[in-house]
Amino acid sequence: MNNEEIKKLALALIQAETEKTVVEILSKSGLWSDKKVWKEVDESSGNWSTIGNQQSAPDTALVEKIINSVDAMLMKECLSRGIEPTSQEAPKSIAEAQKEYFGIYDGKLSSIDASARSNLAENIFLVASGSKASPSYSLVDLGEGQSPERFLDTFLSLNRGNKSKIQFVQGKFGMGGTGVFRFGSPEHNLQLIVSRRNREIKNKTEKDLWGMTIIRRIPPTGQMRSSVFTYLAPAGEILSFTSKTLPLLPNDDLDAYKKSIEHGTFIKIYDYQMSTGRLRSDATRHLHNRLSLLMPEIALPIKVADTRFRKSPIKTLSGLSVRLDEDKRENLEDGFPGSGEMTVQGQRMDYSIYAFKVGKRETYATEEGIIFIVNGQTHGSLPRYFFERKVVGMNYLSDSILVIVDCSRIDRRMQEDLFMNSRDRLGGGPLQSEIERKMEDIIKNHPGLRELREKRKRELVEHKLQDSKPLADVLENIIKKSPSLSSLFMQGVRIKNPFKLTGAGEQEKFKGKTFPSYFKLSKQHPSKEPKHCPINRRFRIQYETDAENDYFKRDKDPGELTLEIDESPIEDYSLNLWNGLATLTIGIPQQSEIGNKLCFRTGVIDISRIDSFSSEFCIEVDKPQQETNGGHGKRKKPSGKDTGKDREKPIYLDIPHAYEVRRNEWEKHKFDEKSALKVVDGGEEAGYDFYINMDNVYLQMEIKENSKIEPKLLEARFKYGMVLLGISLLDFDNKSKKLKGEAPEKNNDVSIYEKIAMFSRAISPTLLPMIVSLSDLEVEP
């Protein structure tokens, strides 16, 4: 083919929107069925073993392509200054590159205004095109671009580590971008690549040409053990052609392929198999929001456009952190986000806690509860059920909390231990468990979350408290008549106070200072008297201050805390600052012995001060404290004489608080007509709260069709039956996991509360008919 024929072929493939069209174009050119013009990616017939083990979802795979475009922009800026990316003169981190090349400070896009972000985003585009049901996605960047002879070492390479020695880019091994291959068009997984090297950085030996290839999947046949990915290379060479520009971008009116570029990279994935209908809809809405979550602190902003609907204008994507900062007043509770730091195995991680107003969280996240990021990209997450763990006790807020943990500072080895190589999920193991334990403690004891939890609970149930006393009386009679039920309530029936009433009054809104005027030990921690702490426990020290909540984690001029003992830094601690109270949680140093007196020193400094706020406190190391199941039980107070009170006693349940929910309250509880029971852990010592749907469609059907039984009696049977079922399921869950040696809170797949909701929904059609039928049953003599 001559230059014009190759260019015509390239433009036809660029504008094609379906797998079928691509196959037709290549067939007419005599290329599709000619095996001689297709070469194996990475020159390996076993490339499926690498490509097939990348990201497990199409959205996270797409993120890797976007990150590659960001890397291409950073590389272009470095090379255009005549700096070798692996040299000492090159930036030592992504944050350093952001500052030097784009004026972005502290690695935060929030440090530049919206107009600057919008202009910067013009360098990278994600464009949805094709059909509404099966869109194609194009990634277009004005970065370094690649000449045809570079394709094999960049786009078509695996495991070559072509970025491994470059410190200011995210990609390292050259294989993450292959994750999209398997999610391409359903039959052949097609992907188009068109690229041209930026003239400013092109070597003299490189030809100033556009390169073009198509990647396709060949399924296993005959003696092939697996699929193999191949690319188009007639005569063993990447197709190339000359053209001053190519029309690759939409214009402002969303007309596709109207705006031309002179260099850069265009990658198109045809008929992309996005996982849900929401993500396949307008890319500027749900997909934009999803990508913002997966790239909370993306290094450079991008533009998102959708040429299919032509309704929503082109939108700038700057990551979740910028979204939350801009929308904070309308979506977050007062005082949030909260922030702090924790150290694990001597390495620091910063975290931010976002508490959303009711119903606002779902705009930003779905099932994720805690997301772990490295250089702005989500590498793994824990589900929101994490907050429902018994040891955390934040059920009432599980659909309102989102935590971001920044792992960018931990070393590469620890990152390898924490995350899978695909960078889309956690790897499990001791390190993850240690991080989870620390996050459990941080969330459980966060004063702002505790206060918000009690507020939410009060708003839901305060006017219904009178319902619980009759329930206790009825259930007590039922339990006394049943030996099996009595075993669940060995200490008798009792109802706990649903609220922690201490300090429940209205509090004055806290207004912190940018730079504090004091940071001192709380009065409950006198510096001269040592605090006692078991050698196997962590201890807390609190400080009073007038610093604002994000003092230690804000983007501009943050404060810094140092902690040391005998002038040696302490590595095992976490720090949380909330409304004038800073809580420092510290682990006993490993070399400590029982009876040791350990004296610590803290210093807090920022750019406004010459001298730090210094404090000293001491602790005395006590004997180890006995652990209960899972290591999260209550502390036992030491006792001298054995009176039998401290001996292990059988576990028993308390009668829960049960509240009736009517149709007008369904939205608050996320109920529908078939919902039956929702159980919520009230946290601390408050016990469980049961919410029963009294307008359940099957209950109302029984009331309507069964005229022989009083409606109130049917409602009572339904209500008490659901409560007893819920109690039994809670008891079974606790006991079964105890037998297996598991902590009840460690199941990250589906929580017991979700299981109860599903089971009660399933049994609600048969509960009342079963009660009526069995009560009439007679045994023949």
Image (spheres, rainbow, N blue to C red):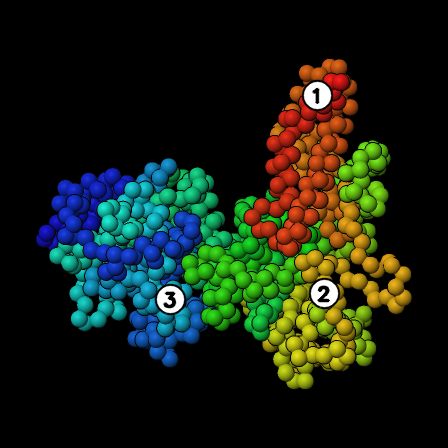
Determine which of the numbered discs, if any, sits on residue 580 in the image.
Answer: 2
Q: Secondary structure at mark 1?
A: helix
- Name the one closer to the observer, 477 or 28: 477
Q: In the displayed orientation, state which residue is furthest to the top.
A: 707
Residue at the image position 61 percent from the left and 37 percent from the top: 758
- Relative side of 179 to 260, left or right: right
Residue at the image position 73 percent from the left and 18 percent from the top: 780
Residue 557, percent across and down?
57, 71
- Relative side of 283 to 228, left or right: right
- Relative side of 383 to 620, left or right: left
Residue 224, percent across and down?
25, 50
Q: Nearer the viewer, mark 1 or mark 2?
A: 1
Query: Could you give the CA–CA distance between mark 3 and mark 2, rounded to whole angstroms?
Result: 42 Å
Looking at the rendered structure, the number of numbered marks drawn on it comes to 3
**Of pointers 3 and 2, the one earlier in the residue sequence:** 3
Query: Could you give the CA–CA distance between mark 1 and mark 2, rounded to whole angstroms?
Result: 61 Å
Determine which of the numbered discs, if any, sits on residue 773 in the image.
Answer: 1
Residue type marked 3: Lys
The image quadrant that residue 597 belongs to is: bottom right
Determine which of the numbered discs, if any, sits on residue 496 in the image.
Answer: none
Q: Nearer the viewer, mark 3 or mark 1?
A: 1
Residue placed under numbered mark 3 in the picture: 172
Classify 10 Å Cα crowding around label 2: few (below 14), some (14-19), many (20 and above): some
Q: Secondary structure at mark 2?
A: loop
Q: Where the C terminus falls, by quadrant? A: top right
**Of pointers 1 and 2, the one earlier in the residue sequence:** 2
The image quadrant that residue 75 belongs to is: bottom left
Residue 396, percent across and down?
68, 47
Query: Could you give the CA–CA distance between mark 3 and mark 1, rounded to whole angstroms?
Result: 67 Å
Q: In the displayed orientation, state which residue is furthest to the bottom.
A: 566
Q: In the displayed orientation, state which residue is furthest to the front.
A: 781
Residue type marked 1: Ser
